[in-house]
Each structure stands twice: as C-alpha cells, then as structure tokens.
Amino acid sequence: MTDHSHTRALIFTGGNLGQWAFDYMSSHDYIIGADRGAYFLIHHGHTPHLALGDFDSVLPEQMELISSRSGELLSCDAVNKDWTDTELAFREAVKRGFKEILLLGALGTRFDHGLGNVHLLRQAYEQHCSLTLIDENNEISLCTDSIQLNASARFPYTSLLPLSLEVTGVTLHGFRYPLNDATLKLGWSLGISNIIEEPQGTITISSGLLLVIRSRD
C-alpha cells in the first residue's frame, strides 16, 4: 500500500518529456520512472521512488545511473513480458494503493503505444482509479458521469470522443458549441474541438465512457 506521505502517483514514461512535466510535481507525489522516463528524471536532478521496466531504450552507462540513484528498481526481461513498461508502471501504482495517477509523456511518436496508453483509462475506471494522461500539448481524462473543467489558456480546445461504442445523454454547459442529451458514437467526429467560454465548463453524460481531450496547437 501507499505511504501516507504520498497522495498521488506520477509516472514519467519513455515518451515525449520536457521541462513542462516538472510543473506537475509536488512534494506529496510518489514518482515512478518507466524505462527511459527514469533516466529523464535522474538526468534532471530528480530521484524516482521507483524505476521500472525492461530498460531496453537506455545505454549501459545510463542504466548504471538508474540503478544507483533510484529509491527502488524493478527490472524485467524485454522479451518475456506481457505489458508495456507504461502499463507495468500503471499496474504497480494501482497495486501500491494509489487512487490518483498522472501519466506524463505517454503520447510519443509511437501511435500504437500512445493509443494503448489512452486505453489504460478504461482499466483505471475498472480499478476505481483516477488517471490523467498529459504531454506538452494534450491532457486526456475519462468522464463516466459528470465533470467540471476550468477554462485553460494552456489547453484551450476540448474534444469529446467515445471510448465505448456510444455515449448517451451528452450535455454541455459553458461551451461555445452546446449539446443537450446528445449521443456520440464511436467513429463520429461530432465532439471534436470545442471551446469553454465561461469560467467553467460542465460535461454530463447518462451512459458510456467519454474521453475528454484538452489540447493546444
């Protein structure tokens, strides 16, 4: 279970990371470095509580740093494993009792890995956890009933896409393009690129799993 001094888990992945990622860190976070994400943390002067993965994307000298400067190391075989390093890190965070998890840099150049990481939102829902994926240009979360969003200069656009076959009862308040009891079906682009025009925008649904994607150009 999680240490009482840590209320949230931050997972730094091997995707696209930058200085922006450190804006999300606080002293109460449990820091996990997944594969190259562990080296990114150490290279920038941060000590991960846990470094995890097959570490097939780091050089031998980088691996030495990861081994010597991480609070804990969990290494696995690069071939004989079922999950990606990011999913391994997510599962480990859940196993350790964290109910709020941020996944930083999970949307890199590999579309297959990026889409797989987005699908972790469904697993988080099934595990009764809050998971948010963040990179420099996007913030992705899941709405299962209702959610309130503050207007954001960093992420001015909000897009809604089903993660289930359909999402019913979609109602928006505070958005430029309102919806009232609408249905969004998998494969439709109806919910893409809306803008919050009030201090807060509210999204309410009746059924389904709705991806809430906040982004910027």
Image (cartoon, rainbow, N blue to C red):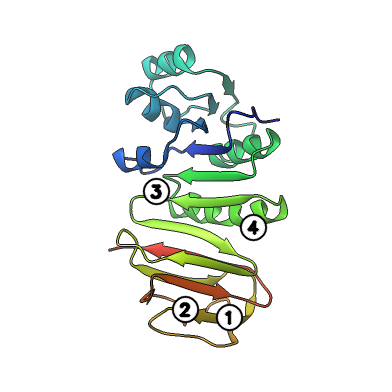
Q: Looking at the picture, which amino acid does disc 1 mark?
A: Val
Q: For the residue carrying disc 1, how many other residues have a C-alpha within 10 Å: few (<14), some (14-19), or many (20+)?
A: many
Where's the N terminus, which quadrant? top right
Sooner in the amino-acid sequence: mark 3 or mark 4: 3
* Residue where numbered disc 3 is placed: 108
Marks 1,2: beta carbons within 8 A: yes
* Residue where numbered disc 1 is placed: 170
Sooner in the amino-acid sequence: mark 1 or mark 3: 3
Task: Indicate which label's residue lies in the foreground, 1 or 3.
Answer: 1
> Residue 38: percent from the left, percent from the top?
44, 28
Find residue 5 and report its image quarter.
Answer: top right
Where's the C terminus, which quadrant? bottom left
| Label 2 to label 3: alpha-carbon separation | 23 Å
* SS state under label 2: loop
Sooner in the amino-acid sequence: mark 1 or mark 2: 1
Relative placement, left or right, of 60 versus 131 is left
Q: For the residue carrying disc 2, how many other residues have a C-alpha within 10 Å: few (<14), some (14-19), or many (20+)?
A: some
Q: Please state which of residues 174 and 98 is positioned toward the viewer in this rendering.
A: 174
Which disc, if any, is residue 122?
4
| Label 1 to label 4: alpha-carbon separation | 19 Å
Q: Looking at the picture, which amino acid does disc 3 mark?
A: Gly
Which disc, if any, is residue 191?
2
* SS state under label 4: helix
